Amino acid sequence: MQKSIHFVPRGKHKGKGLAVFTSGGDSQGMNATLRAVVRMGLFIGCKVFLIKEGYEGMVAGGDYIVEAHWKSVSNILGEGGTAIGSARCMEFHQREGRLQAAYNLIIKEINNIVVIGGDGSLTGANLFRVEWASLLNELLENRKIVEEQREKFAFLKIVGLVGSIDNDFCGTDMTIGTDTALFRIVEAIDAIVSTAHSHQRTFILEVMGRHCGSPPPSDWPDKLCNKLIQERNAGQRLNIIIVAEGSIDRDGSPISAEDVKKVVVDKLRQDTRITVLGHIQRGGRPSAFDRALGMRMGAEAVLTLLETPPDEEPQVIALRGNHLTRVPLMDCVVRTKAVSQAMANKNWDLAVRLRGKSFERNLESFRKLSRLNPKNSELSIGFENEYPKGGFRFGVMHIGNPACGMNTAVRSFVKNLSYYSNVSVFAIRNGIDGLCSKLIEPISYKDVNGWTRMGGSNIGARQTLPEGKFMRIAEILREFNIHGLVIIGGFNAFHSAGQIFEQREKFPEFCIPIIVIPATCSNNLPGTELTLGLRLSAVGTNFRTFVVETQGGNSGYLSTLAGVAGGADKIYIPEENFSVRDLLDDVHHIKAKMRDGVQRAMVVISEFANANYNSEFLNRLYDEEGKDVFSCRKSIIGFVQQGQTPSPFDRRLAIKMGQMTADWILNQAKIALQLTGKVRTKECDSAVLLGLLKRQYVYSPLKSLIPESNFEKRCVKNASRLWWIKLGLLNKIIARHSSINDEEGIFVSLKSESLQD
């Protein structure tokens, strides 16, 4: 793996020609990517072109290749599809078509291309790059170009961005558009559940995804019916079955939604309906995640393209965990095609492995959580000495404000431990207050059915800290014989766990495994880059400036990501100081922007960004200073940010963290089990916070995280180390009008990784 960090000043690549086009199927977030490519290209001095209608426009030339300006990509951030069109092009498959495309690019002085599409589009771009020298030679022989042009544009540099709702491209954890498509599917499922429950129906949803799945065995009808029968016998009133449009079984036989309905109706006589989501999944406004991902990837693509040597292998900008990296383009394409070949050969296990670890983990999580009758004594047979008499007893509680994903995490934790007959889980209601009041009751896998889609906290959440109540807490833990504690929540959850950990010398009852699952929309905890509960939205209208206030406490994460996703002109956060002069400069920026014909502006401010310059002050200032050009309105989103249903991202993260928490706490309890039957440990790694750092889930000891925390402001001490702070600078470059953009440049920090990393 290679890593380079250097400063790219504004205007460094003045005069260089750069083009961007979209090809293949459209996906939400492509426009956010286009916007970032154009504006980052302009910022570093490039002459940027938009190629309309993909390869077809490249071959046609003329008005299909148009120069882009800052305003060219205004007001497209929140739009679905692709603003410059996408089309199939048979001519480009032939050398004559590629020869014409090369000529069209040369006369526009373009030899740097950002390709947004799938594996077919990227393969075509690489072939074009490989042939480039011979194409120029042929154009020279035909006297279409001169020697000076051939020498000046001797190399064609390309970089790939994957736009696809199928998420079927190897090398990246997420493609542009996948999150929005998942959001549409999950939203449809949540809507269908209520009517299915009312009428005790079975619903079959057909979704897109082609061959990006794992085929069931050939006896799937029997297995499906057995599962449905057992679930109905257990009291479940509804069933949801998802069928991908290209589904097949392990023998290669197709499985359609109608096939599934026939099996259910003929064998079980259940009232069954089919809903085909179709292109609803592909259309509509992109999610906050896809907007932010598109902006990040688009900017990185431009910097990669212009900052790498011309003879370097072309790269794809990939998302690994929460970080962007570069991966060799053709390695990814070859591996993606190998998946298709493995499926054609019916080598399903190989196909799953080739998809990557992320796909494997998600598939395993689904299989484990969807098993019938979780209680399975086979998981305990032969290990009686590893369990205390009566089995292990673990408590789970919520502390702090409710956050989306809390209930999902509880469900995952409970269901993963339900496979052990000698493990019991107890729900501690209303946090520390409930613990002191003995609001503790057993919770089983049946109790948490349906919790995945529920927002808030079904077991109650309070912000009370344990300080001053340690003796009472120790008494209750001893009385209920709790062998391990799971605390889900935000900074107060982390603070509570830390306080209990620090009292271990005084109270042996606290010498049990303790783990924190971070869940807060503020994303203000040490030891993790992402927390559960991050849900974003933004609004806007014509000739109006909105001042939007978000929550987040003394952490500017929510404001920053909301601003990035909403295309905010300015983001005010606690981590960055600002003065009245800065505010007036921002007003002048918006006035200049609107005089240029852009009809909407938005500024986002965190609730504690400044004690004096709050959202009310900003609203009055902007309204007064900009009254000859625009009007201003204030919007305080408030607790809406904590409510509603969990996003697909929150659900996936919560399921994974719940599963890992179950494995960790059971293992720690076994290690700490004494001959007396008590669980006792003072090891630092027995009290941890489970977080996501870069590409890894990490169990960070609370002892190491406490010194990194500012408990007065409820945030981390060193804000400059936070990954999302850099997005604020990126947003300034992308969103700020080019006429008054005063940023001096940007640091490039790109990792070049192999596909195996």
Image (cartoon, helix red, strand yellow):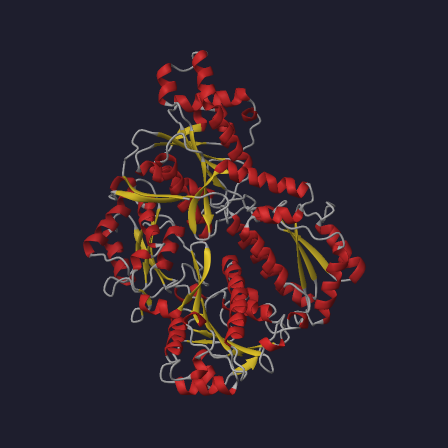
Where in the figure is residue 178, as x and y percent of width and height?
Answer: 52, 49
Q: Residue at x 26, y 46 (%)?
A: 589
Q: Is residue 74 visible?
A: no
- In the picture, measured across the screen, residue 366 lies left or right of residue 740, that is right
In which image quadrant can residue 39 be found?
Answer: top left
Where in the figure is residue 456, as x and y percent of width and height?
Answer: 49, 69
Residue furthest to the right in view is: 266
Residue furthest to the left in view is: 581
Q: Residue at x 31, y 29 (%)?
A: 15
- In the picture, measured across the screen, residue 414 lies left or right of residue 267, that is left
Say if 575 sits above or below 51 in the image. below
Where in the figure is residue 522, as x and y percent of width and height?
Answer: 38, 63
Number of labelled discs?
0
Where in the figure is residue 268, as x and y percent of width and height?
Answer: 78, 62
Q: Residue at x 31, y 38 (%)?
A: 43
Seen from the viewer's position, the closer of residues 288 and 195 is: 288
Q: Is residue 578 visible?
A: yes
In which image quadrant can residue 709 be found?
Answer: bottom left
Seen from the viewer's position, the closer of residues 309 and 757 is: 757
Q: Work out which quarter of the rendered image holds the N terminus and state it.
A: top left
Say if 222 sits above or below 706 in the image. above
- In the picture, measured across the screen, residue 343 lies left or right of residue 454, that is right
